[in-house]
Amino acid sequence: MSEPASPTPDDAPFGDPGRVIFHEKLVPGAGMWIFVALTGVASFAVGAPINIPIAIVAGIIVAATLGLILYSSSPVLEVTEDSLQVGRAHIEREFVGEVEVFRGENARIACGPAADGRAFMNFRPWVSPVARIHITDPADPTPYWLTNSRRPEEFALALGSDPAEQTVRTPLIDQPVAETDEEEAP
């Protein structure tokens, strides 16, 4: 028998060529796993007055199902030599521009009041630091990608940004000033 032909560039999945430089799966933190366990306990408590063995099975099934859903739906951040993947979104590295890192209050503002509605956003409530990746593709109307990362400086470095600059350059984003209808008194 002959060996199967190697995939051609048209057959190869996007992002496969190239060495992986950065990989992170945004799995839930400890607090969310405690919530999953408590959901299982609550399911047991609801069924226990009726039938304890069935309540035990129901509690395990509820906790396992919720845990599986949370884990399997956690997005992956992956940087290769040729591409960037954030969740299900992919882009070639040649269209990746400047990367900015935000923490604390800056991250909250970057994700909320200062966010551009055209941006691709990938947020998980259990991860607070944010990276903003500017997109340079002139055919793409998306100005930037905004995603959580537990290691945003490493993520920025993998995309070609200098981490030393990141700590100095993490700007406070100005919040828009609300206009008032009140007229000033003379």
Image (cartoon, helix red, strand yellow):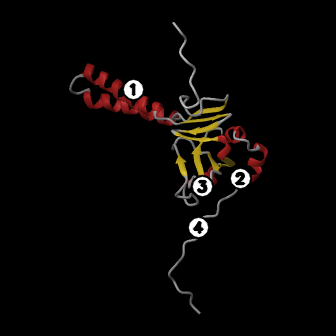
- Mark nearest the camera among 3 and 1 is 3
Query: CB under 8 Å between callouts 4 and 1?
Result: no
Q: Nearer the viewer, residue 72 or 17?
A: 17
Task: Please rate how many residues cluster around mark 2, counting C-alpha atoms within 10 Å: few if below 14, some from 14 to 19, many from 20.
Answer: some
At x 25%, y 28%, the residue is 47
User: What residue type is disc 4 on?
Assistant: Pro
User: What residue type is disc 3 on?
Assistant: Pro
Count how many numbered circles sit on residues in the image: 4
User: What residue type is disc 1 on?
Assistant: Ala
Residue 115 picture quarter: bottom right
Q: Which residue is mark 2?
A: 170
Quadrant containing the C terminus in the rendered view: bottom right
Query: CB under 8 Å between callouts 1 and 2?
Result: no
Q: Which residue is mark 3?
A: 143
Q: Earlier in the sequence, mark 1 or mark 2?
A: 1
Query: CB under 8 Å between callouts 3 and 2?
Result: no
Considering every residue shown, the one lying at the far left of the view is 50
Q: Earlier in the sequence, mark 3 or mark 2?
A: 3
Label 4, label 1: how far apart the Cα atoms are: 44 Å
At x 55%, y 60%, the residue is 113
Label 4, label 3: how far apart the Cα atoms are: 19 Å
Q: Secondary structure at mark 2?
A: loop
Q: Earlier in the sequence, mark 2 or mark 4?
A: 2
Q: Earlier in the sequence, mark 4 or mark 3?
A: 3
Q: Position of residue 148 (x, y in %)?
A: 58, 43
- Mark nearest the camera among 4 and 3 is 3
- Image mark for residue 176: 4
At x 27%, y 32%, the residue is 46
